[in-house]
Image: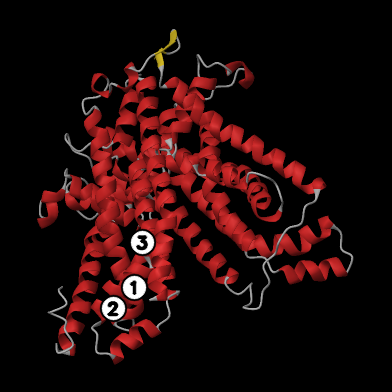
Amino acid sequence: MSDAALRPGATVSLEARALRGGLLLAFAVLLAGLVLPLGTLLLRAFQDAQGSFVGLSNFAEYATTPSLRQAAWNSVWTAALTTMLVVPLAFGFAYALTRSCIPAKGFFRAVMLLPVLAPSLLPALALIYLFGNQGMLRDLLFGNSIYGPIGIVVAQVFYCFPHAALILVVALSTADARLYEAATVLRAGHFRIFGTVTLPLARYGLVSASVVVFTLVVTDFGIPKVIGGQFPVLATDVYKQVVGLQNFNMGAVVGLVLLLPALLAFAADRWANRQRSGLISGRAVPYVPQPRRARDLPLLGLCVLVAVALVGLVAVAGWGSLVTFWPYNLSLTLRNYDFDQFDTAGWSALWNSVRIAAAAAICGTALIFTTAWLLERGTPGSALASAVRFIAGVPLAVPGLVLGLAFILFFNHPSNPLGFLYGTLAILVLNGVVHFYTVMHLTAVTAIRQLDPEFESVGASLKVPAVVTFRRVTVPICLPAILDIAVYAFVNVMTTVSAVIFLYGPDTKPASVAVVHMDEAGQSSAAAAMAVTILAITASVKLLQLATGGLVARATQGWRQR
């Protein structure tokens, strides 16, 4: 909307209608991209193949099918085991970054993010090169197979580690130094201080990290698909019911079962966040660690070991992408990067992913940031704002595989007027935006709440329309947060597998799905090459963000001074 349309002489009702129209647009996107698809998924779980209502018969069939019950139990116990391995390891790593004086903290922080920048299939492929039937280190498994729960758990530890570590870094960064000073004055030892001060302050961060890891493992599709072998889990069961058996009703039932642990984890995470919000007072003093060799050297050793493991798996995947024909011809070649020879989509799959991720980053960031501003500063008290605010928190509890299944049931329905989107890039963009909506929304809300409300008050006193103030003041000052949102959207949409496995068409296959198909066809080196290429693209975008971060920060500071 132009400045002329909202000049000081324009009516207040025109501005109010513009703000309400923006909120209605956000509501419509969330309605079409989340509420209606999930409603369709819920409805299909109570229908038969002809669309007749059958009550709980589908759920009864699920409960009486041993293989389906076994898949649910396998998902739960592998997720629990992975959580027990990842959270202590991530806590030690985060403790080293925040409560010690080890060198090279910036390097360790960068290495920690490697799994975030790669598709979840990359560690699974690397483990196959190391411990598969022809793997270089297969003897270390003492006759056990990497295909199954061992491979799933080890790959998930790699994949989930940064998510837990990031949460725990934040939890450990908010300590109040006065508590440690008081404990020292009382002559408490280091272990006693750790047990009575550090752990209690970080307990809610530990809960959040555990919840996130458990949910990621239960809902991930890529790792069990590549390295799970004949070991069934819920995520692969959904895929088998929908793609293999074309049983959409039972697929909907399994999808709802898959949704249950995510909802429980979501509720526990919300509880932890509410409890954590009151731990630090406004008079808290930041904790600054002092050098202590007895603590710093072991923590440095831990960080080195973790970094070697993370970089090592990526390096193995990179080496595997250059092998001519593994395991029989280990000479190096770039032929595996000629994707047209190994997949029908070829290089166009990679180009599709870049376009989808870029569109999700641009359109999603614009929609989400504008919506967050409307909720906080536009029309925060309206019933429509309350509805949008509630729906915006729901995607965090919806696994990507469930959302993808809900999309196929909703958009592929014959009576749906939005059916023309199915099989296009647009539906993949919409899915990506909705899937990661909550995290981006919370980032935008946090940035907007940090702004002084006086900006709007001064604009209103000068009769400057709120939309003009938003465009000229709010957006420039919040540029760092906007850039974070855009990069987050690009990276996650580029690497996701679960959310898009049901939605691509012949001409819209994403690169992450191409990795799955190459691996299924036995082209493991080409699959590794595609995964490494995805990692290179996302890492380049992240490096570009870091390189331009200083310029954006200086520009933002200039706007604040103006």
Asked which secondary structure carries label 1, the reply is helix
| Residue 147 appears anywhere in the view | no
The residue wearing badge 3 is 482
Asked which secondary structure carries label 2, the reply is helix
The residue wearing badge 1 is 474
Of pointers 1 and 3, the one earlier in the residue sequence: 1
Other residues around mark 2 within 10 Å, as few (<14) / some (14–19) / many (≥20): some
Question: Horizontal placement of 280 versus 333: left or right?
Answer: right
x, y percentage for residue 437? 35, 59
Residue at the image position 43 percent from the left and 41 percent from the top? 117
Other residues around mark 1 within 10 Å, as few (<14) / some (14–19) / many (≥20): many
Cα–Cα gap, marks 3 and 2: 17 Å
x, y percentage for residue 347? 24, 29
Q: What is the image's colouring?
A: secondary structure
**Residue 469, label in figure:** 2
Residue at the image position 32 percent from the left and 25 percent from the top? 518
Frontmost residue, 508 versus 7: 7
Asked which secondary structure carries label 3, the reply is helix
Mark 3: which amino acid? Ile
Residue at the image position 48 percent from the left and 50 percent from the top? 215
Cα–Cα gap, marks 1 and 2: 7 Å
Given contact means CB atoms under 8 Å apart, are the residues at marks 1 and 2 in contact? Answer: yes
